[in-house]
Image (cartoon, helix red, strand yellow):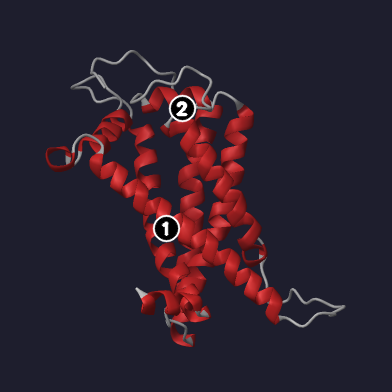
Amino acid sequence: MGLVREFYRSTVGKKMAMALSGIVLVLFVLGHMAGNLKIFAGVDLATGDYKIDDYGRFLRAMGAEMLGHSGVLWIVRVVLLACVVIHALTGIQLASLNRRAKPVGYEVRSYRSANAASLTMLYGGLFLMVFITYHILHFTTGTVHFRGFVEGEVYSNVYSAFQNYGIAGFYVVAMALLALHLYHGTWSMFQTLGVDTPRWNKGIRTAAKIVAVAMFLGFSSVPVGISIGALPAPIAQAGTN
């Protein structure tokens, strides 16, 4: 553990921690988006339940024989929370180191090599921490849902929440910032891992853009779809939660 601690204290160690935790979070975001899109799959004709509700039950039931109901899900949540904390704290520490390393007194600051993503990484990341906390309280615990939250009824909970245009807009803005963060973070992650050569850079940057745009469109399609009436109001379900 001492070697790990010493390695983390170095700039290289912090960047590696950012990259590795970022990989886990990017994979989670893409998987979470794929799950969210099940809201457009409608109702399972055999059971009368929404397919996204079936998906939610599957997540809570997987591994129940060994770890109990929701056991695997809670392990995943703990790992993700640890990655978020490591990613956020390390990002703040690196930003602080960068500021201290720069000479004071520059009157002209060049933004030529910076883009919108890199300029919003720190503050966008802090906003996303607030959003993640709100999102958990909104759809996981239902604490701030305020519209008849029922555990297990994913479709109904999501539909009722996004009847409020302000909440729907807040989610879309959050997803735009997440897309910027993911784009720049993915690009930086490959640089940190040593995949930074002229031969690969263009392809990596293009792939990062594609992933970021796909993520934004995928996540935003849910609040937007509900707000414009593209998804129907929930119906009574035959199954049990």
Where's the N terminus, which quadrant?
A: bottom left
- Name the one closer to the observer, 219 or 190: 190
- Report the amino acid beneath label 1: Cys
Of mark 2 and mark 1, the one earlier in the sequence is 1
Near-viewer residue (201 or 136) = 136
Residue 115, given in percent of the width and then of the height, sits at: 66, 68
Residue 169 image label? none
Residue drawn where x is 53% and y is 59% of the image: 88
Pinpoint residue 4: horizontal percent, then vertical percent. Answer: 38, 75
User: Which type of secondary structure does the marked residue at label 1 adopt?
Assistant: helix
Identify residue for label 2: 142
Q: Residue at x 70, y 74 (%)?
A: 99
Q: In the image, is residue 43 above or below residue 134? A: above
Task: Identify the residue at image location x=60%, y=64%.
Answer: 92
**x and y, in percent, of residue 170 in the image:** 61, 38
Up-down relation of residue 155 to residue 170 (above or below): above
Point out the residue furthest to the front here. Answer: 2
Q: Which residue occupies the foreground of this view, 210 or 90?
A: 90
Packing grade of label 2 (10 A; few <14, some 14-19, many >=20) is: some
